[in-house]
Structure formats: structure tokens, C-alpha cells
Image (cartoon, rainbow, N blue to C red):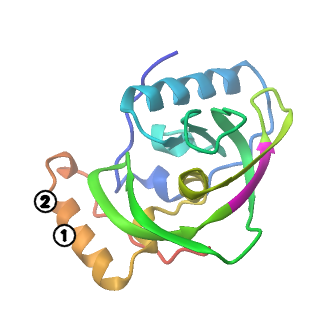
Amino acid sequence: MTVLDIRKVGDPVLRRRADEVTDFDAELDRLVRDLTQTLADSRGAGLAAPQIGVSLRVFAINPDLPGNDLQLDHLVNPVLDFPDEETQDGYEGCLSIPGIYLDTRRRMNVAAKGFTKQGDPVQIVGNGLLARCVQHETDHLDGILFIDRQDQAGRKRLLDTVREASWFEGLPAPEVRVSPH
């Protein structure tokens, strides 16, 4: 296992739709272990493969998130379903945009189907923070960042703040998109 550098906003890999995983092999096992270790080291709630420069549909989540009854620490090729229209507002941050937290609207409840690193089918059903995390990480796999979920004024404030951040120097200007979800 290795702790890897986390890519920051402005890196093009964060804006591409990640490829489906087709091989459930030792390379995927290593990727999941690296994601899990990097997430643990950063003390975040979740981390998607594009955030470490790998354009595959895999993310790691903190197994201790409230509601994670399976204590699942990763999901491969997730597909989300929303059982209702209920939403939640809450502060959200991103390891690829360090130090910035914004009120972000998400769905309250989610059912995420996917696979384990061994290729076994699995489903995560959750609400609240777990639902927020699963949606956030799946957005990463679609090339969407949480800044894309802000209104125009919020996006402008965020971009101004990012441009002034010490870690941003030398990165290309971040692109803001409208989320398809």
C-alpha cells in the first residue's frame, strides 16, 4: 500500500468521465489498497480514483461513516438510485480543493449498486452523510466536482478563493460545469 498525492482542482483527470473497470485483478486490488491508505492518511470521508490520477470508476469510503452497516471501504463501477426526492443541505469539502467547505444540496437517500474489488456484486443503502459521500465520490467518477453544484455566486466566490490558495499556484484555471445530476 502506498499513500499517493491527491490531484487538485485544475488537473484535467478530475474533469474526465472515468472508465468502467473490466478486470478484477491484482492491479485493481492494488488500486483499492492505495485509495484506502491515501484516504486514511488524509482523514477524509471518501476518495475517488481520478483524485489520485487513475481514470477508473472506483472509490474508497471511510468504513466508519454513520450508516455504513456493511463497513464497506470501496465500491467499483457504482450506479446510483434515489428512492425518493428528499434532499439535504450541509457543508461539504473535497480533498482536491483543500480547506474549502460549502453548503451543498444532495439527495438524502441513496442506493448504490456496484462491485467489490473481487467482482462480487454489492449494494450500499444509506442516508445523510453516507449518502452525501457516495454521491460526491460518484460525481468524481463522472468528472463533476462539488463546486459544480453551487449557484453562480457561490461558484464565483469559490473560484476567487481557489485562485488565492497557496496550493493552487501553477495549476490551470479550474473549469466549472453544470452537474448533470
Name the side, left or right, on which 106 lies relative to 24. left
The residue tagged 2 is: 164
Is residue 122 placed above or below 153 in the rendered structure?
above
Residue 107 x, y percent position in the rendering: 60, 69
Instruction: Name which residue type carries label 2.
Output: Glu
> Which residue appears at 25% of the width and 69% of the height?
159
Instruction: State the residue lying farthest toward the bottom.
Output: 152
Q: In which quarter of the image is residue 31?
A: top right
Residue 177 x, y percent position in the rendering: 46, 74
For the record, the magenta segment spans 110-114
> Which residue appears at 27% of the width and 57% of the height?
100
Residue 119 x, y percent position in the rendering: 84, 32
The residue tagged 1 is: 160
> Which residue appears at 39% of the width and 33% of the height?
43
Residue toward you, 53 or 77: 77
Instruction: Tell me how far mark 2 sits from mark 1, CA to CA.
Output: 7 Å
Q: Is mark 1 on a helix, strand or loop?
A: helix
Q: In which quarter of the image is residue 62?
A: top right
Is residue 80 placed above or below 152 in the rendered structure?
above
Instruction: Name which residue type carries label 1.
Output: Asp
Q: What element carries label 2?
A: helix
Of helix, strand and loop, which mostly describes the magenta segment? strand
